[in-house]
Image (cartoon, grey):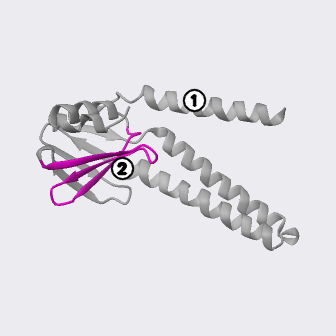
Amino acid sequence: MIEVISSFIAAAFGGFLYWYIRKTANDVSFTTDGLAKLVMHPSYKYLSFICLLICLVCIAGAIYDHERMDTTGFAFLLLILFLFGFFGVYGLLVYYNHTVLFDEQVIICRGPLGRVKRIAWADITDVVHDTNLAVVYLYAGSRERLSIQQHVKGFDEFRRTLVRQRPGFASRIKT
């Protein structure tokens, strides 16, 4: 019975998170230059902090109960710290750094590590939508690649602009 309840809670939380992200898919802010500015959804920040909190609790538990920890427990602790620590740090980097600016001529994208790339709409040669990673890759003629997270606030406006600017690639972005 507890498995059914926990599965229901997990499904309800996942459904709520999906609804909340999709609700803000049309929230676009504009810079003073008239560029549309897309930023990551705040849920990335909260989920990243939860991951880092799990790491902190695991570290505190290991310090408190280190006498009873055997090799298997230590290996499991390292695995949890690596996985949740990686996703926590990466999620915060994505939330605070990933920004997309665009208008009718150009797209400017700053990645999670702060690297800025810029391509013109006319230079786009291919569009790939990876639904597993929720990323849209835009390729330019020089094989330059922009990665745009699907969970940025205002993604629907970006999709509409892509359809206007490059109608041949419209079918490649799934909703």
The residue under the point 40% across, 42% down is 40
Q: Which quadrant would residue 100 be assigned to in this image? A: top left
The residue under the point 67% across, 60% down is 80
Figure quadrant of the C terminus: top left
Residue 161 as seen in the image, left or right of residue 12: left
The residue under the point 21% across, 32% down is 163
Q: Which quadrant would residue 64 be assigned to in this image? A: bottom right
- Residue designated by label 1: 15
Residue 35 seen in this snapshot: no
Q: Position of residue 154 (x, y in %)?
A: 33, 33
The disc at residue 134 is none
The local secondary structure at tag 1 comes to helix
Q: Which quadrant would residue 107 be assigned to in this image? A: top left
* Disc 2 residue type (three-letter): His
The residue under the point 59% across, 60% down is 85
Figure quadrant of the N terminus: top right
**Residues in magenta?**
123-152
Q: Position of residue 153 (x, y in %)?
A: 37, 35
Distance between the Cα atoms at labels 1 and 2? 24 Å
- Is 148 contained in the magenta span? yes
Q: Position of residue 37 (x, y in %)?
A: 27, 39
- Residue designated by label 2: 98
* Disc 1 residue type (three-letter): Gly
Main SS class of the magenta portion in the image: strand
The local secondary structure at tag 2 comes to loop
Q: Earlier in the sequence, mark 1 or mark 2?
A: 1
